[in-house]
């Protein structure tokens, strides 16, 4: 028994939208980061599902790369959040708004 | 030609490989000798690496590597593969990477900007604690950008793009105790993470529609009609890809990070991002849309000519960038917005493509990015010089700088007028070609008349704020109550600024060959 | 032979190198950059001679070096593309001119050692750099193979002229004279530029030579009876030709744009010799000769050239009669002599015009350098009434100056006689056929008398009689670097006439009209740029009084007689120990002449009463209407800018939201356009 | 009979049982509020300070290193899967070389992090001293 590809796409789309919602509403930098991770994972679901569907491994391998890059991104992001905290005493992303217009 | 020394084909990747190697050397140096502040050695290694990359890229270009046609290259001492015979683009690793004229062209741009930035950083970053980290991050980012020029598959594109982005985030925020720098880094990073998520999702959709990630394979699937069933997925995927590229090139609506990141970042990094990073963003944009989504077949599948997307983006980007720049009081921020505006100009290169032509306008966009690499880097480095002297950030603070630094201010005038597209400088020609290219394509699609009109209006507006800066430094008198304490004359910054200025001027007489090269490169990717 | 042509760019580039060297390192070099200039111009001279030899042995050369713009613009005659290039055209005319220019430039550089270095001037690197730049531009103008390149270097020589006239920029008069020179010649050049654009737009080419030249295209258009821009082809050729002539009149100081040249004497005398006598002023005449095939197509244009020339020759000569400043006399004589060349070219006497151009370059450079030597002798005194008696104190200067004067006055056998005689002969034979040209001839002829008079007035006042000032009693010595150029040019002034002894040929049948053969391409050259090719095109017939020989003798006799008459008259009046000005005898004419026929006054009046009100009106229009619109646009833009930048709120979450909104809008727009939702 | 029904039923049961147990215990248990009961449980120790204390920065350093290195392992798997085939087809150099290079680069990164004190828990006084001089 197989599940139709459209369900995977719907699942990933839902996940993507949840991530997007998090990005737009969360003010905590870590939550922002997690939401972005959700979006990336939505893409991973797509990639793996389509790899299965198309019968080639390209998507799966690419999903691995995406995960690795997501990890690297988190590493850099955490670093930036650390200095953010050191400078602003907060991890609220809306606090630093000195530069505008 | 017989006596040429032939290198294996993978050696065509020497420009990015040299950059990567230099980054690793710097890392190794810092591991052995942690927290070294031996600036001459570190900056020297970085500059040498960037120059080596530049020299190899120029060399390959001259030798005809990746070019087509039997008389593509000159007889040089060593060549890659049998490229002298003009066998066309070199495919590497099963088509994951490709080295052709366009790749080499942008490798040159990236390497030049990297070298300039590394030279300028010698003075600008003096006294900063993380010297080795700074330079190795710079070179890693440059590696990513250089690889982007050669990336020929959505996998390599994404990896290269992230390799360019991640060090950039860190570089923007590298002034750890400077709130502006940290704020800039945070905003850049958050928008970047969001954009790359959208981008990856776009990739997954394109993969879903075609089952491939390699660009030529995607094009083939589209051409053979096997993607017809997934036109919705493909269309959405393409728009999401555009989003990812728009982030990298600082195009509206993904440009929001740019003004802040450029304003808050150290000036050399702002120069680096706004020139090299933008150019690298454009090269993959050009490659993806010319190689993977050929206009004719893609239109048949998704029912929409994708140039429309770029027409909209080009107009909006130009307008937002230039209008927002017009009333800035902060020089660096003005340059940041102008950089957004210039992304709009370069987008014309894709907006004005037509089914049976467009190499002129695509070539013009490439030329514009090359010229921009010099003039914009120079302008930001001038801001770096001003920051080095601590003269303040606003236009008013720049008043009368020419009395103190006439040479640098003359260079600044060159940059500004070239950015505005005033005839005697390099910026004029590329803009002129973009304009004529847009008009030519207007016969096929009258919306391009609008683009051409927007180009003219925005250029006129840009002259206003560029000349404002020139007026400030040359004509206005410094506030006499201000007792400025200038430091010495920073040799590195000066050298970089002057070199950029000379190149901006020299590119005018040299424009013939540059234009030929760019148009050759453009027609090569359009044909394939 | 090919080597010579391959080396031709070096002729031009050597002085450019000298310019750079003098500019950058002049201060650190012995002689402040003079040596670089001397070496470069000597190299140019040698290479020019080499090129001349190559042309003499049957060569000609045209090569495009650099195409700096090419476009697909359809011209009026249907040529689909146009290219703007830099290239060289080496033919008899340009080879000859190259030698003249580089020779005089070389001699002037040498002379400058005496005139500038030894006199302790400051700013010498600037001086030599500007001389180098001038020489470069002039040579490039000479070898230009197309009209646009010619125009560009035409402008560049104008710039150098401006810089060099204003060399002593701390004085009051020099900058003013420089500005005047620049503005007046620019006024002419404005028409020249219009002409270049018109010719380019009409024929789609700006090349001087070949089947693809605008000359050939114009000939074809006239033959085919085409209509160009609503005019008949010939009328249009006349119009464009006259537009280009505007530049010629400005540069060669022809009436009514001659007023700048006397003022230009504010520059160093060496500069006057090089630029305002021998070479740059010749650029106008050279340009007419260069595109003579084009003018030959239009009898109207030729007639206008002839009349402008004839009138200027007489007009300037009369003014030269009353001047007291030695350089002023020479300046007016220069204007007058260029009038002769224009007259010669205007009546179809291509060889005569070029011949006089060559001779004049030699003897007028000689006279100016001689005047420079006199000025050195006189401790920088230029008023002839304070000189006198220099003959015995400085014999070399005197005799060389005398040779130049005899050549200028046109006394046989000095070079000036032969060329002036040929011009007048060409004018009279055309005039006999078409009587209207007799008027031009008459003016030219009358000017001969005045020329003889003022020339010898100058010689006698300067060198003869008793010294009239302390400086004249005790002149400053001059050294070899002043004498050497004078001697060289003195010899040339004496013998250059040999180049084209046309009267001798016509009287005896001896084939010694070498210059005519030379310009006729009998040694080498392009068939479409030869004297005989032009002769076929020139629309004038000729007639003789009796036979050719009789006409020749009459013309020569008249010319020589008047010249000698003028000289003798001058001798009677001024070759006395204590000469009197005698100008009172002229009555009210004296005032008019002293005031240069009120030329400056009326031009100033025109500027103040015509141009200025117009400019005011335009300014008012600009201030109110245009600026109103512009200011409106800019306020709207700036307001829009103020709104636009508010988008950037500084809060990153808003950015993310706007980004997503923007993305969705894009998606929706594309979806609607692409029909994804139906 | 659809297979999905079984899965759905399992999920339903899985949810119901814990919910039911919580509901039952809520109904049955006596409610005796007391301070020590509400206190945070720390293995019997008396809690000190709030829960939201700042951790030592080194936690993050090690965590970051871990994240990166952990994830990079993932990239070893596809390589390991095809290693034998690749060995047969391309030879040792091309099969093993790239991965060695990859690991070498990672090792260089680790060495750098190590040398720069990323895995150092405490600083010697001397290090603290030099640290102070840095901007």
Image: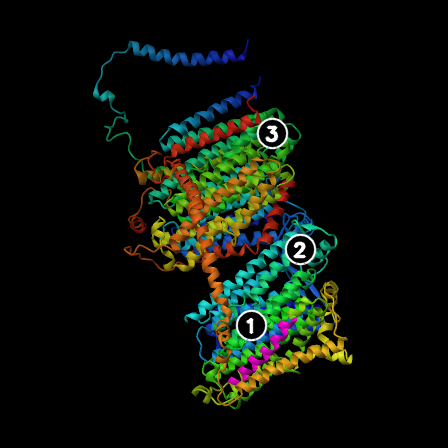
Mark found first going from the N terminus, 1 or 2: 2
Tag 1 residue: C316
Tell if the residue under mark 3 belongs to the same chain as the one under mark 1: no
Q: Nearer the viewer, residue C362 or C315?
A: C315
Residue B37 visible somewhere in the drawing: no
Sort mark 3 into few (<14), some (14-19) or many (20+) by Cα contacts within 10 Å. many
Q: Nearer the viewer, residue B221 or C476?
A: C476
Q: Quadrant of residue C447?
A: bottom right
Q: Nearer the viewer, residue B131 or C235?
A: C235
Q: Magenta stretch mostly in which secondary structure? A: helix
Q: Is residue C453 magenta?
A: yes
Cα distance in 3D space between marks 3 and 1: 87 Å
Looking at the image, residue B273 lies above or below residue C191: above
- The quadrant of the picture occupied by the C terminus of chain C is top right
- Magenta region, residue range: C441-461
Cα distance in 3D space between marks 2 and 3: 68 Å
Residue A26 visible somewhere in the drawing: yes
Cα distance in 3D space between marks 1 and 2: 31 Å
Sort mark 1 into few (<14), some (14-19) or many (20+) by Cα contacts within 10 Å. many
Looking at the image, residue C200 lies above or below residue C99: above
List x then y, in percent, for residue D92: 60, 43
In screen coordinates, is C288 left or right of A42? right
Tell if the residue under mark 1 belongs to the same chain as the one under mark 2: yes
SS for callout 1: helix
Tag 2 residue: C235
Q: Chain of mark 2?
A: C
Q: Chain of mark 1?
A: C
């Amino acid at each position: 028994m197989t599940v139709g590809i459209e369900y995977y796409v719907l699942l990933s789309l839902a996940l993507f939208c949840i991530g997007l919602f998090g990005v737009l509403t969360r003010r905590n930098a870590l939550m922002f980061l997690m939401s972005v991770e959700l979006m990336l994972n939505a893409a991973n679901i797509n990639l793996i599902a389509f790899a299965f569907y198309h019968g080639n491994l390209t998507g799966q391998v690419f999903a691995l790369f995406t995960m690795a890059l997501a990890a690297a991104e988190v590493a850099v992001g955490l670093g930036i959040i650390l200095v953010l905290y050191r400078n602003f005493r907060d991890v609220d992303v809306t606090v630093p708004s000195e530069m505008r217009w | 030609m017989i006596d040429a020394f032939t290198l294996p084909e993978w050696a065509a990747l020497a420009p990015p490989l040299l950059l990567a190697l230099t980054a690793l050397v710097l890392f190794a140096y810092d591991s052995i000798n942690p927290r070294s502040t031996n600036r001459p050695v570190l900056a020297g290694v970085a500059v040498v690496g960037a120059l080596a990359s530049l020299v190899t890229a120029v060399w390959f270009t001259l030798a005809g590597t990746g070019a087509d046609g039997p008389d593509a290259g000159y007889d040089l001492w060593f060549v890659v593969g049998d490229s002298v015979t003009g066998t066309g683009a070199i495919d590497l690793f099963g088509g994951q990477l490709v080295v052709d004229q366009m790749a080499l062209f942008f490798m040159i741009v990236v390497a030049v900007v990297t070298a300039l930035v590394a030279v300028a950083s010698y003075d600008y970053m003096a006294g900063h604690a993380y010297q080795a980290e700074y330079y190795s991050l710079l070179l890693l980012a440059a590696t990513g950008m250089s690889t982007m020029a050669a990336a020929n598959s959505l996998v390599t594109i994404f990896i290269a793009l992230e390799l360019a982005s991640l060090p950039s985030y860190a570089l923007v925020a590298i002034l750890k105790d400077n709130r502006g720098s940290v704020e800039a880094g945070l905003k850049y990073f958050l928008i970047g993470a969001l954009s790359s998520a959208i981008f990856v999702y776009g990739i997954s959709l394109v993969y879903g529609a075609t089952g491939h990630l390699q660009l030529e394979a995607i094009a083939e699937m589209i051409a053979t009609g096997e993607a017809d069933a997934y036109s919705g997925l493909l269309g959405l995927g393409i728009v999401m890809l555009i989003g990812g590229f728009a982030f990298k090139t600082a195009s509206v609506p993904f440009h929001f990070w740019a003004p802040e990141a450029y304003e808050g970042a150290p000036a050399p990094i702002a120069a680096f991002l706004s020139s090299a990073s933008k150019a690298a963003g454009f090269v993959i944009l050009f490659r993806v849309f010319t190689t993977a989504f050929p206009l004719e077949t893609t239109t048949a599948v998704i029912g929409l000519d994708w140039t429309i997307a770029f027409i909209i983006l080009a107009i909006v980007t130009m307008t937002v960038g230039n209008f927002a720049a017009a009333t800035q009081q902060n020089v660096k921020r003005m340059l940041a917005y102008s950089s957004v505006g210039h992304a709009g100009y370069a987008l014309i290169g894709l907006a004005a493509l037509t089914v049976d032509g467009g190499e002129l306008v695509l070539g013009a966009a490439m030329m514009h990015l090359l010229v921009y690499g010099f003039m914009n880097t120079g302008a930001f480095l001038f801001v770096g010089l001003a920051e080095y002297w601590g003269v303040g950030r606003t236009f008013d603070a720049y008043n009368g700088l020419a009395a103190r630094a006439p040479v640098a201010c003359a260079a600044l005038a060159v940059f500004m007028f070239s950015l505005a597209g005033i005839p005697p400088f390099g910026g004029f020609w590329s803009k002129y070609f973009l304009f004529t290219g847009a008009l030519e394509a207007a016969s096929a699609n009258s919306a391009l008349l609008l683009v051409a009109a927007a180009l003219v209006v925005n250029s006129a507006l840009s002259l206003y704020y560029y000349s404002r800066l020139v007026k400030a430094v040359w004509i206005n008198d410094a506030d006499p109550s201000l007792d400025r304490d200038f430091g010495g004359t920073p040799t590195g910054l000066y050298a970089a600024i002057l070199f950029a200025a000379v190149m901006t001027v020299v590119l005018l007489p040299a424009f013939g060959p540059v234009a030929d090269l760019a148009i050759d490169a453009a027609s090569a990717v359009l044909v394939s | 032979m090919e080597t010579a042509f391959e080396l031709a760019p070096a002729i031009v580039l050597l002085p450019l190198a000298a310019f750079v060297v003098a500019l950058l390192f002049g201060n650190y070099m012995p002689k402040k950059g003079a040596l670089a200039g001397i070496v470069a111009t000597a190299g140019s001279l040698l290479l020019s001679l080499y090129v001349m030899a190559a042309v003499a042995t049957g060569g000609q050369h045209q090569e495009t070096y650099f195409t700096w713009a090419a476009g697909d613009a359809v011209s009026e005659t249907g040529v689909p593309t146009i290219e703007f290039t830099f290239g060289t055209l080496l033919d008899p005319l340009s080879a000859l001119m190259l030698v003249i220019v580089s020779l005089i430039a070389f001699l002037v550089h040498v002379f400058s050692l005496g005139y500038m270095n030894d006199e302790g001037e400051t700013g010498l690197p600037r001086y030599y750099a500007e001389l180098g730049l001038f020489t470069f531009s002039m040579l490039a103008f000479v070898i230009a193979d197309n009209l646009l390149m010619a125009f560009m270097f035409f402008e560049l020589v104008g710039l150098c002229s401006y810089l060099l006239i204003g060399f002593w920029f701390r004085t009051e008069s020099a900058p003013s004279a420089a500005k005047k020179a620049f503005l007046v010649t620019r006024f002419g050049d404005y028409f020249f530029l219009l002409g270049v654009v018109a010719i380019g737009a009409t024929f789609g080419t700006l090349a001087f030579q070949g089947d693809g030249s605008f000359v050939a295209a114009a000939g074809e258009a006239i033959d085919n009876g085409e209509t160009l821009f609503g005019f008949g082809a010939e009328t249009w050729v006349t119009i464009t030709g006259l537009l280009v002539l505007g530049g010629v009149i400005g540069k060669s100081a022809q009436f009514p744009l001659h007023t700048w040249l006397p003022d230009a004497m504010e520059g160093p005398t060496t500069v006057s010799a090089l630029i305002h006598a021998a070479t740059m002023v010749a650029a106008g005449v050279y340009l007419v000769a260069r595109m003579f095939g084009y003018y030959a197509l239009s009898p109207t244009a030729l007639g206008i050239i002839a009349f402008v020339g004839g009138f200027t020759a007489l007009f300037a000569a009369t003014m030269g009669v009353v001047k007291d400043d030695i350089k002023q006399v020479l300046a007016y004589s220069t204007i007058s002599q260029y009038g002769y060349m224009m007259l010669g070219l205007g009546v179809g006497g291509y060889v005569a015009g070029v011949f006089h151009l060559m001779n004049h370059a030699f003897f007028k450079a000689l006279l100016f350098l001689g005047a420079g030597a006199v000025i050195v002798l006189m401790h920088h005194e230029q008023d002839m009434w304070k000189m006198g008696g220099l003959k015995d104190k400085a014999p070399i200067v005197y005799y060389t100056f005398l040779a130049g004067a005899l050549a200028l006055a046109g006394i046989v056998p000095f070079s000036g006689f032969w060329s002036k005689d040929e011009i007048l002969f060409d004018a009279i034979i055309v005039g006999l056929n078409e009587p209207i040209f007799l008027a031009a001839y008459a003016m030219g002829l009358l000017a001969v008398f005045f020329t003889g008079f003022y020339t010898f007035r100058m010689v006698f006042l300067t060198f003869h009689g008793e010294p009239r000032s302390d400086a004249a009693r005790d002149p400053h010595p001059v050294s070899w670097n002043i004498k050497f150029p004078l001697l060289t040019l003195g010899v040339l002034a004496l013998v250059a006439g040999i180049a084209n002894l046309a009267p001798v040929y016509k009287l005896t049948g001896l084939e010694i009209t070498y210059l005519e053969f030379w310009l006729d391409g009998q040694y080498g050259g392009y068939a479409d740029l030869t004297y005989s090719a032009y002769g076929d095109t020139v629309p004038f017939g000729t007639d003789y009084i009796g036979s050719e020989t009789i006409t020749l003798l009459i013309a020569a006799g008249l010319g020589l007689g008047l010249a000698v008459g003028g000289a003798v008259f001058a001798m009677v009046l001024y070759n006395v120990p204590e000469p009197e000005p005698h100008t009172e005898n002229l009555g009210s004419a004296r005032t008019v002449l002293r005031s240069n026929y009120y030329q400056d006054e009326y031009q100033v009046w025109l500027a103040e009463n015509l141009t200025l009100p117009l400019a005011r009106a335009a300014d008012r229009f600009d201030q109110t209407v245009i600026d109103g619109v512009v200011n409106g646009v800019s306020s709207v833009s700036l307001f829009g800018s103020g709104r636009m930048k508010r988008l950037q709120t500084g809060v990153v979450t808003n950015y993310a939201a706007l980004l997503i909104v923007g993305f969705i809008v894009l998606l929706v727009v594309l979806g609607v356009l692409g029909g994804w939702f139906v | 009979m659809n297979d999905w029904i079984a899965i759905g039923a399992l999920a339903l049961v899985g949810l119901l049982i814990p919910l039911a147990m919580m509901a039952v215990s809520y109904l049955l248990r006596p409610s005796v509020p007391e301070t020590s009961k509400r206190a945070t449980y720390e293995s019997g120790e008396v809690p000190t300070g709030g829960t939201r204390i700042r951790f030592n920065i080194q936690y993050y350093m090690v965590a970051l290193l871990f994240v990166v290195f952990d994830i990079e392992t993932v990239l070893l798997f596809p390589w390991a899967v095809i290693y034998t085939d690749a060995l047969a087809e391309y030879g040792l150099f091309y099969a093993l070389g790239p991965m060695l290079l990859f690991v070498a680069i990672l090792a260089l990164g680790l060495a750098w992090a190590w040398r720069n004190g990323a895995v150092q828990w405490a600083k010697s006084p001397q290090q603290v001293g030099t640290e102070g001089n840095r901007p």
